[in-house]
């Protein structure tokens, strides 16, 4: 498959105090850019941009996901929490409990993460060392079905349910 490089439109780093989430990175991408095939993203893992016309079903996965489907779920208002495949089992269990009962989340391993855990939403991302980092819950509370999602409320089921 042909891989197309995607331009990063805007990046701002935020190390806010009480008004924000420390270490939050934000990005700006135009919504609705549906493309087929494998794509290259500016962030690792991606936090927006062109994506497959089908979205990834929200849920907990034990295998890596295709970026192109997961990014479409972000456009719908999902938060994608990714972790290194070698993350301790107790840490993975903590992440599963964190997303339990939430209908617009994805949880999956992700090879090549620069930190043990990352949480991504459309246009936003936080990277942390431990699953019990309070910034993860703050990120979920702010971005799951949050105002930055271009298609907030669109389906998070009925799409692609497979893994890589």
Image (tube, grey):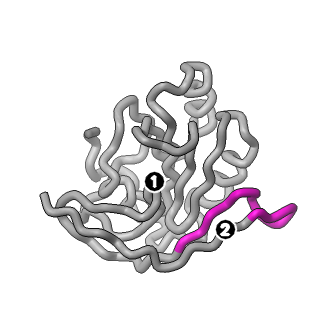
**Residue 160 falls inside the magenta stretch:** no
If the image is split into quadrants, where does the N terminus sit?
bottom left
Toward the top, the furthest residue is 89
**Which numbered disc flags the more N-terminal residue, 2 or 1?**
2
The image shows residue 71, relative to residue 98, as above or below, that is below
Give the x, y percent position of residue 141.
Answer: 67, 54
- Above or below — where is 149 with respect to 143? below
Q: Which residues are magenta?
A: 15-27
Q: From where the camera sits, is residue 121 visible?
A: yes
SS state under label 2: strand
Circle 1 packing at 10 Å, graded few (<14), some (14-19), many (20+), is some
On the image, the x and y values in percent for residue 51 come to 31, 65
Distance CA(mark 2)–CA(mark 1): 15 Å
* Contact? badges 2 and 1 (CB < 8 Å): no
- Magenta span: chief secondary structure: loop
> Can residue 17 be found in the magenta stretch?
yes
The residue at the point 66 percent across, 54 percent down is 139
Which residue, as the protein is rendered here, is positioned at the far right? 18
Residue 110's spot in the image, x, y percent? Answer: 42, 40
Query: Could you say where residue 61 lies in the image, as x and y percent from the top left?
Result: 40, 34
**From the viewer's perspective, is residue 101 above or below residue 18?**
above
Q: Residue at x 72, y 48 (%)?
A: 135
- Residue 162 image-quadrant placement: top left
Q: Is residue 109 left or right of residue 124?
A: left
Residue position for label 2: 13
- Which residue bears the numbered disc 1? 44
Number of labelled discs? 2
């Amino acid at each position: 498959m042909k891989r197309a490089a995607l331009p990063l439109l805007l990046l701002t780093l935020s190390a806010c105090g009480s008004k924000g989430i420390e270490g939050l990175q934000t990005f700006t991408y135009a919504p609705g850019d549906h493309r087929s095939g494998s794509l290259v993203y500016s962030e690792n893992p991606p936090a927006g941009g062109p994506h497959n016309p089908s979205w990834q079903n929200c849920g907990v996965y034990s295998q890596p996901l295709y970026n192109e489907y997961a990014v479409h779920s972000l456009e719908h208002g999902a938060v994608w929490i990714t972790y290194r495949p070698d993350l301790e089992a107790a840490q993975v269990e903590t992440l599963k409990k964190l997303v339990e009962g939430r209908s617009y989340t994805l949880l999956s391993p992700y090879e090549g993460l620069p930190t043990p855990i990352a949480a991504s939403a459309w246009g936003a991302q936080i990277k942390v060392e431990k699953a019990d980092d309070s910034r993860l819950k703050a990120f979920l509370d702010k971005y799951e079905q949050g105002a930055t999602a271009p298609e907030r409320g669109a389906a998070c089921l009925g799409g692609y349910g497979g893994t890589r």
